[in-house]
Image (cartoon, rainbow, N blue to C red):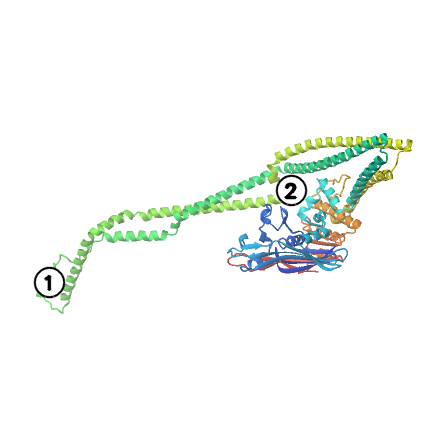
């Protein structure tokens, strides 16, 4: 099966309609973080299976999201943000993904999934109240003998399930983050499940099951016919009745044994999971303590900044609003001081008594000085001098009259001035205290915020370590640290339950062996009786039953040999791939070792990168063996498979993967476009298409205060 192209419109980071063509061989999609690789992978998975991958949560459906407590997005949020923002009221936005593929028989399929969002009359466009989301619409079109057929919804889902069986999806379409859940060195059940889903081995189990059921059916027919033909022979009837009873008991006990084995497998998985979690928790107790201390310190610092913020909010309208009025207070003080200076200044006595007004008037009449007797006329300076003296005396008398009239009011005003004259100084002191209080709170706020930033940086580093532990051990040490006691109790209960189930299984096996032994004896007695008594009728079903028994035994032996042989082939093929992926490593790198019980040897001396390469080698080995045996080829699509690899390892991985699958689509950030290795990779014959994902940045909007970024697809090969 080959994917020919994908067209994405308004889905997640892909704005408007964009198409990518694919061919056989390696199709490489390169993009740094945040450029849209995971969104492209989501597009593939969403169009086929209606789900989107969310880090830390897993695959989540995009229909009926409010009912999904795990889903972190609103229903409209997988539609491109810019398309939503630009929509007008009552306008409909469509998000769709379409892929075209060709199966192994040459039939072309076009699969399209779309969803429409109607813009409602709501001010905030980025709100669930602003959108009415219609259900997903799925359509599959393909050529048939009757012409082009179009299937919708449930029928379309059935066709997709036929093209991509449920059991194989996780192995041919996987995220690098989910690698641990597919192949876990500490849980052999993961490899057992992988073999079950993606190899030819289950056909042996199916064949064995068919033979066993046929044998039971034949034995039943044989028993009924023998009873009917020998109904007058009491010995035959007794033996047949005993055989029938034993067959019934064997059937019931086989069912009981299968149920016990299933229960034991379930308990073992739970026990392995619990032990993995406990080992992870025990190994990282100090990390958990650091993380908790860091969280508590961040909470404390947040509480402090909140307290200061509330304090500032309280003080601002009450007192701090007075900050900045100091120049006004100083001006008021100057006005009060100036008033005090002028208030106590009595009008200057200007020639009031010497000479008196009456004497001056007499001099003017006689035009002669009363001291020296000098005479003068109206044109002389002496005359004008006497007139000026009279005018000054008149002005002074007016000032004194006004001063005297205002004395009472001045006394009252001066009493008020006396009360407030100290206010400016006290207010200036208070303003100084307010200013200091504000500066102190700002300094404290800045200090706590700086401490909080440092703690958040520390927490981010711890988060990275914890994420590595989650990938490696399948356990979150922080969230499950408090449940260690519960996990321990469950482990003890699981072990006790496992022991009990194992004892029951041993009893069941022994009972089954006893029943089968009794059945063989009864069948031998029936055969002997038939040899001695020629009147006993025989039926051909007896021979068929004996042949079925022989085939059942042969099939079980062949099945077991085939199982072990398959595990050896997986180990051998995985080591070939692993050697390619580690070719440039000069240090210790170990090898893949798989036991007959599906266990994979864990090598404590390897780092995470080597472990991931081993897991991917095993998955690639399984898929390639399956393709060769079954002749069924699926496109291999992976997002971030090289996230734990360096550039050299990624280069080796891509060189290896290009020749394993008929078609592979790899999304990665770990390729340097300016390197010689990229040029060599680009020139490889089996590298068919190369795309680079870039960011398309749109201008920010004043009301939104942000820039819109969408994915732009650039063709490199």
Q: Is residue 4 visible?
A: no
Q: Dot 2: within a 10 Å radius of its alpha carbon, few (fewer than 14), some, or many (20 or more) residues?
A: some
Residue 602 x, y percent position in the rendering: 72, 40
In the rendered view, does 84 fall on the left or right side of 394?
right
Question: Which residue is more in the foreground, 328 or 369?
Answer: 328
* Picture quadrant of residue 710: bottom right
In the rendered view, does 358 fall on the left or right side of 624?
left
Residue at the image position 11 percent from the left and 67 percent from the top: 376
Question: Which residue is more in the foreground, 167 or 706?
Answer: 167
Residue 451 x, y percent position in the rendering: 52, 44
Residue at the image position 73 percent from the left and 47 percent from the top: 619
Cα–Cα span, label 1 and label 2 = 117 Å
- Judging by the rendered image, the residue that carries numbered circle 2 is 469
* Picture quadrant of residue 520: top right
Q: Tell me: residue 402, above or below residue 186.
A: below
Residue at the image position 27 percent from the left and 47 percent from the top: 419
Quadrant of image for the C terminus: bottom right
Camera-side mark, 1 or 2:
2
Which residue appears farthest toward the bottom when viewing the image?
A: 379
Q: Label 1's element? A: helix
Instruction: Identify the mark at residue 1; answer none if there is no mark.
Output: none
Instruction: Identify the mark at residue 361; answer none if there is no mark.
Output: 1
Residue at the image position 71 percent from the left and 47 percent from the top: 167
Which residue appears farthest toward the front when viewing the image?
A: 232
Residue 495 x, y percent position in the rendering: 68, 32
Q: Label 2's element? A: helix
In the rendered view, does 133 fall on the left or right side of 48?
left
Residue 609 x, y percent position in the rendering: 69, 46
């Amino acid at each position: 099966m080959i994917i020919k192209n994908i067209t994405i419109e308004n889905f997640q980071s892909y704005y408007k309609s964009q198409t990518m063509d694919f061919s056989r061989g390696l199709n490489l999609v390169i993009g740094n973080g945040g450029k849209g690789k995971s969104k492209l992978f989501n597009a593939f998975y969403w169009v086929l299976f209606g789900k989107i991958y969310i880090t830390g949560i897993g695959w989540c459906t995009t229909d009926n999201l409010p009912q999904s407590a795990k889903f972190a997005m609103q229903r409209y949020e997988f539609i491109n943000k810019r398309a939503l923002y630009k929509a007008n009221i009552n306008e409909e936005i469509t998000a769709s993904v379409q892929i075209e593929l060709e199966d192994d028989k040459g039939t072309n399929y076009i699969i399209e999934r779309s969803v429409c969002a109607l813009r409602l009359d709501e001010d905030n466009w980025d709100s669930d109240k602003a959108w009415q989301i219609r259900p997903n619409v799925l359509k599959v079109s393909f050529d048939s003998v009757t012409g082009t057929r179009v299937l919708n919804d449930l029928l379309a889902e059935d066709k997709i399930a036929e093209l991509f069986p449920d059991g194989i999806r996780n192995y041919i379409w996987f995220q690098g983050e989910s690698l641990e859940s597919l192949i876990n060195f500490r849980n052999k059940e993961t490899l057992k499940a992988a073999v079950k889903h993606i190899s030819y081995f289950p056909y042996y189990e199916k064949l064995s099951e068919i033979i066993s059921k046929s044998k039971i059916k034949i034995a039943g027919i044989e028993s009924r016919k023998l009873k009917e033909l020998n109904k007058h022979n009491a010995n035959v009837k007794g033996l047949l009745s005993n055989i029938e009873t034993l067959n019934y008991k064997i059937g019931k006990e086989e069912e009981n044994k299968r149920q016990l084995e299933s229960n034991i497998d379930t308990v073992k998985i739970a026990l392995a999971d619990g032990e993995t979690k406990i080992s992870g928790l025990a190994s990282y107790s100090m990390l958990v303590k650091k993380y908790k201390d860091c969280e508590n310190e961040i909470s404390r610092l947040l509480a402090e900044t909140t307290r200061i913020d509330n304090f500032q909010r309280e003080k601002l309208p009450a007192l701090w609003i007075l900050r900045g009025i100091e120049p006004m207070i100083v001006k008021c003080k100057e006005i009060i001081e100036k008033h005090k200076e002028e208030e106590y200044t009595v009008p200057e006595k200007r020639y009031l008594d010497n000479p008196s007004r009456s004497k001056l008037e007499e001099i003017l009449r006689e035009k002669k000085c009363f001291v020296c007797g000098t005479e003068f006329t109206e044109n002389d300076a002496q005359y004008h001098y006497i007139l000026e003296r009279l005018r000054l005396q008149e002005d002074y008398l007016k000032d004194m009259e006004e001063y005297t009239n205002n004395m009472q009011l001045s006394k009252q005003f001066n009493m008020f001035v006396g009360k407030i004259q100290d206010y400016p100084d006290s207010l200036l002191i208070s303003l100084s205290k307010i200013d200091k209080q504000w500066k102190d709170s700002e300094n404290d706020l800045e200090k706590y915020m700086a401490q909080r930033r440092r703690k958040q940086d520390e927490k981010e580093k711890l988060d990275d370590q914890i994420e590595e532990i989650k990938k490696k051990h399948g356990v979150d040490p922080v969230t499950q640290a408090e449940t260690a006691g519960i996990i321990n109790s469950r482990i003890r209960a699981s072990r006790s339950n496992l022991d009990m189930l194992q004892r029951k299984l041993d009893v069941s096996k022994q009972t089954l062996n006893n029943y089968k032994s009794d059945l063989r004896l009864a069948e031998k007695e029936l055969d002997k009786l038939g040899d001695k008594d020629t009147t006993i009728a025989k039926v051909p079903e007896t021979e068929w039953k004996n042949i079925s028994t022989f085939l059942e035994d042969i099939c079980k032996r062949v099945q077991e040999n085939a199982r072990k042989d398959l595990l050896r082939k997986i180990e051998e093929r995985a080591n070939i791939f692993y050697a390619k992926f580690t070719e440039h490593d000069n240090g210790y790198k170990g090898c893949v070792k798989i036991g007959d019980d599906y266990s994979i040897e864990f090598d404590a001396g390897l780092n995470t990168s080597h472990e991931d390469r081993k897991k991917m080698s095993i998955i690639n080995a399984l898929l390639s063996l399956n393709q060769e045996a079954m002749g069924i080829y699926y496109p291999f699509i992976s997002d971030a498979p090289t996230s734990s690899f360096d550039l050299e390892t990624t280069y080796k991985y891509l060189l290896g993967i290009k020749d394993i699958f008929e078609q592979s689509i790899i999304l990665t950030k770990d390729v340097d476009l300016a390197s010689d290795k990229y040029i060599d990779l680009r020139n490889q014959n089996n590298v068919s298409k190369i795309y680079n994902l870039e960011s398309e940045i749109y201008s920010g909007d004043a009301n939104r205060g942000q820039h819109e970024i969408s994915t732009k697809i650039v063709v490199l090969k």
